[in-house]
Amino acid sequence: MSKLNATDIQGFVLRGYNMPYARYCFLHFEDAERACSLIHRLLPVITTGQRWDQGKPQSTVNIAFTHQGLISLELPIATLISFPVEFQQGMQERGGILGDTGVNSAEHWDQVWREGHVHAWLGIHALSPEALDARTTEMQTLMTETGGARLLASQDATAIVMDGKVTLKEHFGFTDGFGNPDYLGVCRSTQPGQGKLMPDGTWAPLATGELLLGYADEAGELPVAPVPHLLASNGTFMVYRKLHQNVGTFRHFLDKWGARYGAGDEFAREKLASKFIGRWRDGTPVDLSPDRPNSDIAQDPNQSTNFTYGNDAAGTRCPIGAHIRRVNPRDAFGFQGRLINRRRITRRGLPYGPFALEDNASAAQGPSELDATDRGVIFMVLNASISRQFEFVQQQWIAYGNDAHLGNEKDLLMGSHSEGEKYCIQGDTSPANPPFFCTGLPNFVELRGGEYFFLPSITALGMIAMDLVDPR
Amino acid sequence: MANQSGSVYGLTLLSPILDDERAVPSHDLQIRKYLATLPTGVDSPFAIAPGTHLARLVVMDDVIYVGMPACEEHLKSKYLIFESNCDGDLDKYLTGLATKIPEHLDAIWSHCTGYPGASDVPAFLRYMKACQIETTFFFAAVNDKSVTDTLIALQTQRAVADFIATHQGMDAAQTQREFIEFIRILKAAPPPPPGVMGAHRDIKTGGRNE
C-alpha cells in the first residue's frame, strides 16, 4: 500500500475538521462554461488533505456535485452513465429503499430538496463565526464574478456550546462523533475498535477502497466507479441528510418509561437513555460500563471505541437493538466481525438549531413546542459505494431487524415507526438491570431532505474545470 | 439421506419445459408471466397447500460456462426448477399440493414435457418423482419443527412480548392471575394460518442492496 497523495484528496474526506461552525451552500449551475470557470477559480481555494503543520486554518472549503450537477456541467454522456445507479437516481428516488416514507417522505422536505435543483454542495467549516462569514463572502464574490452558480439555499450548523465550552453533544444530549473507521493510508495512527476486527482480537485499518475510489476494497476489487479512472480516483461519494430531532418527544418518552424502569428515579432515566443508544450520555460505552457512566473510559481513545459484543450475545449489557450496536454491529453477527467490513461508513456532521437545556424552562415549553423548533443534525456519510454501504445500513440495520435477529423491528432512534412496534431491553435478575419493553414508539427523528453527491479529487476538479473529462 | 434433514424434507425438481417454436409467447415466457403474478402472503399457493416452509420456482433457460478458456455448451432443454423445504413425507406433501392448488400446478406445469395434470393424483406423484433430483442444501432458516409448530412458536413469542409490555410493573398477584388466563387463551388459540405473521414492511427489498 503506497502512501496516499493527500494533496490530491479533499481534506473533508481524510479528516473530520472538528471545527465548530459550518455553512453548507447549495448551488445551481446556470451555464456550463461559466460554472467551469467558477470551479477553476475554486481550485486553489479547496482544502486538501495536506497536513496542517502550521496549525488549523481559520476556515476550509470543499465541493461535491449531484448527478444533475454533473449533467449541467456537460460532462460526456459516456461518463455520466458510468456512475452508479443510486447516484444517478438521487436520494429522493431511492426513498423506497431507504424507508423514507410517511413523515420522512419528500413532501415533508425543505423546499430546496423537494425541487431537485441542487447541483453542488459547497461546504465551509470555520473556527469562528467571523471566519465563516468572511469565507462565505469570498465564495459569493467568486460566484458573482464568474456568474457560474446561483445560491439556492444554505444551511448553517454549529457545535453545541455548554457552559461556554464547545462540545460534541447532539440535541438529545449524547456525546457524538466518537468513532469513524480507520482506513489504510488515511490514518496516521489507528484507534482500537475503529477498523476491522482481526482473528486475534486486534483491530486493523479497513482497505482504502472502502472510502476512496481507485483503490482496492475489502474484497480486493476496485470499487464501482465512473470513467475515466482519473475522474474517479481519490474521490468518494457523499450522502447528505438533514435530520430533524423531536427533542420534546424524546424527553417525554424518557420521562414516561424512565419512571417505570428500575428504581424509576433520575438515575434509572439516564440508564434507560443509555440502553437506547448503547452509550451513556457522556459517551461511555454501555458494553464496557453497564452500571454507570465513566468519563475515564469515555475520554480514553484506547477504550472509548475498543469493545465487542461477543461476550454480550444476550444483550444484557448493551441491548441487541441499541443504536450503536445496530449501525456498527462489530462482532455481533459472529464470524469474528467479518460480515460487516463492507458495510462501514465514515460520518461527518454537526448539529443545527438552538440547544434546549433539560431545565425547568424547557419543561414548561411542553413536548410539541420543543419538537417544533428547527433543530437536528446535518448527517453526512462518505463511502465508496452508496448502495453497498450507506443504503445497506439504512435499509437493513435501521429500517429492518433481521440481521440482528430482531425480525421486523426498526432502530428505536432513527426508525420510521408504525403502530405495535416495541423496543426490547434485555436484562438479568438484578433489580437495577431488569428486562424491559417500551411500546408506542414515536418518531424521534424526521428527515427534512438530502441528496447524494460525488466528491471528486483535486485532479478531477481540474479536469472538470478545464473540460478534460474524456471517457474514451 | 440427502433429501431429509430431521423432520424437514428437501424437494428439488427439474421439469423440462416444452420446446415448441409455434407457441407464441413461448412456454417458458408463459411460465415466467404466471410466476410473476402469483400472490404472496395468505393467498400464496404455498400458504393454501399445507406443509411448505420455503418454496422457490425458477425458470432456467440455459447454463453459461464462466471460466477460462471459454467453452460453449448448452442444456438439452429449458427447465422449470421447483425447490421446496417441506414437512415430512413426500407423498403426503405432493398429494396436498395436488388437492389444494391443482389450478396453479396445472397453469405452471402444463408448459412442461409429459405433465399429466394434477387431477390424476397417482400420475401426478409419478411425474413429480420422475423429475426429482437429490437435495443437498436446505434453507438455512428452517429448523427441525413443522410448519404448524413454527407458526405457533411465532404466535407465542409475539403474544408473550405483548403480555409483558402491557403487564410490566403490575402487582405480582394480579400479573399471575392474568398470566394464567393469558396462557389458557393462548393454548386454546388455533395456529395462525401460514403467510399472515409478517408485519407489513413499507420498504423496497431486493436488488443490489440485499
Image: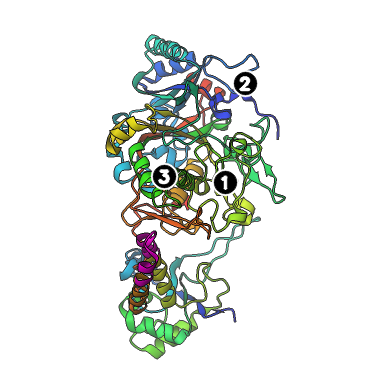
Image height check: is A135 above or below B118?
above
Camera-side residue: A146 or A5?
A5
Q: Which residue is mark 3?
A: A413
Q: Is residue A113 left or right of residue B14?
A: left
2 vs 3, front mark: 3
Work out which quarter of the rendered image holds the N terminus of chain A and state it.
top right
Q: Chain of mark 1?
A: A
Looking at the image, the residue that sits furthest to the right is A200
**Disc 2 chain ID:** A
Q: Earlier in the sequence, mark 1 or mark 3?
A: 1
Query: Do the residues at pointers 2 and 3 share their chain?
Result: yes
Instruction: Give whichever of discs 1 and 2 has the lower sequence position.
Output: 2
Q: Which residue is mark 1?
A: A342
Residue bounds of the magenta highlight: B161-177
- Tell me what residue is drawn at x 40 percent, y 76 percent: B112
Residue for badge 2? A50
* Vertical side of A453 occupied by A401: above or below: below
For the residues labelled 1 and 3, the Cα–Cα distance comes to 23 Å
Tag 3, which secondary structure? loop
- Say which amino acid is labelled 1: Arg
Amino acid tagged 3? Leu
Label 1: which secondary element: loop
Corner quadrant of residue A92: top left
Q: Position of residue B38 (x, y in %)?
A: 33, 67
Which residue is rendered at x = 68% and y = 42% of the image?
Answer: A204
